[in-house]
Image (tube, rainbow, N blue to C red):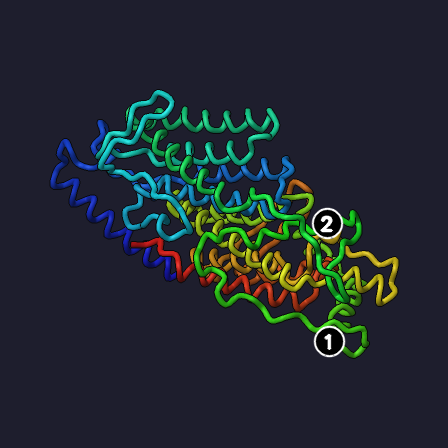
Amino acid sequence: MKYLNNYLAKKYLLMLSIATFTISGCKKDDWFQVKDHNEQLKQTYDYPSDVAIKWMDMQLRLIRTNATPLGGLMPGRYFGYCGIALYESVLPGMPAYRTLSGQLSSMPAMPSLPATQPMPSMQGMQPITPGFACHWPTCANTALAYMNRNFFPNTSIANKMSMDSLENALNSTYQNEVSAEVFQRSVVFGKAVAQLIFDWSKTDGAADVYPLYESPSGPGLWVPTLPAFAPATLPNWGSNRLMVPGSLDGTVPAPPPAYSTHLSSDYYKMVREVYDISQNLSTEQKEIALYYRDNPGYGDGHYLSILMQVLQQKGSMLDIAAITYAKAGIACVEAGKGCWRVKYQYNLERPITFITGTMNRSSWLPLISTPAFPEYTSEHSTVGAAFSTIMAGIFGANCYFTNRTYDYLDMRPRFYNTFDDMENEISVSGLYAGIHYRISCERGLKAGKKIGLNIENILKFLK
């Protein structure tokens, strides 16, 4: 809420300065020189967030209909980089805000408007002329189209046609709103930003080839489980480049309870609780577990879906959409990597291993399939809490909203009065599902909150 108050104050001052500028008269070489003088007053906050929401919806469709090499984590990675590309593509229309270049790890310098030199031409188009304005929805449309095409190069022909159709339909509208010169300039600028962001994304280590992972063995350590007995997923993901230097400071939890088969031990009690809960699940607990299994569904793309819905429900403008998309996306990426570091540091076994083996409940199964990676801590808890912390910082802690992500699966929507309510429900879903211990959910939640706060404190959006 403090963030929004600062934003509104600077927005008021900006509008006042624009009014003063307009009264004093416009010269030929003024920054927002365009043929239609009404365009001088158009800033990013003057436009609805439709272009961002339409591309978020498209990205969710692409996530749902494509197999991705990084499993549930890949959607979170797309979320992060696309949010940054959107933010930087409309940033010149937000004079109170600063670039993330120089703040995010190895992020290249972004093209700027006004520029000191014309930007190079692309695909036969003329260079951007220094000192001229852009149409920010066009910039956003071009940037998000470029990012999604390059993140999903092997998607179906139908999906490729859908992306083309969306970009062209929006451009047809935008071409009627501005001059041909402003439209072309906006397309070139949006693409220039997206090219730099996408090329930067390729250097984060996600595509690196690592040596074959050898899972450590011993009592209480992770082993492949039902249903597929698949090998460990993404063991090196946590070692990839962080977006925000220092984002994981102070977030590594204490070790889980020491392995023990004694009935009175903390370890045995920890596992036994999962079994006992599984025998008496209420209808509500089952619904929570199934809603946040995200398979079928979107994996970490579920957070993008929630973001899209909150923007729609709150009627947010394009500037808020860009800021939220970037900051929340970054938080999800960092939280995912932080959680993965912890998982492969402790390599804790899943409940199914101990329950079916040591506890001799050989026929026991969790409510949902057990993922193929170590248990401690819960990724849903960590990422959900980081995401929730960012959302509460922008929209306020007491923010009523509805999550209808899985209406298409005929699942009942989830209703929340606060983002804390949401993160707590997401966290406990793994316990109800039979795939996480309570301690993994609680400590993941704590780590995720800390990651979100670290990002809030390190990244500076306002000047």
Q: Is residue 182 left or right of residue 348?
A: left
Q: Residue 365: name its quadrant.
A: bottom right
Q: Position of residue 448 (x, y in %)?
A: 54, 61
Look at 46% across and 28% down and name the residue there: 167
Q: Which residue is mark 2?
A: 231
- Tell me the tag on residue 266: 1
What is the secondary structure assignment of the residue under circle 1? helix
Residue 38 in view in this figure: no
**Residue kind at label 2, given as amino acid type:** Pro
Using the image as rendered, state which of residue 204 and residue 441 is in the foreground: 204
In the displayed orientation, state which residue is furthest to the front.
211
Q: Dividing the image into 4 quarters, which one contains the C terminus?
A: bottom left
Residue at the spot 55% in from the left edge and 64% down from the top edge: 447
Confirm or deny contact between disc 2 and disc 1 (CB under 8 A): no
- SS under mark 2: loop
Is 454 situated left or right of 188 in this image? Answer: right
The label number, if any, that marks residue 57 in the structure image:
none
Q: Of the residues shown, which amino acid type is indicated by label 1?
A: Asp
Q: Position of residue 173 (x, y in %)?
A: 40, 26
Q: Quadrant of the N terminus?
A: bottom left
Q: Nearer the viewer, mark 2 or mark 1?
A: 2
Q: Residues within 10 Å of mark 2 (few under 14, many from 20)?
A: some
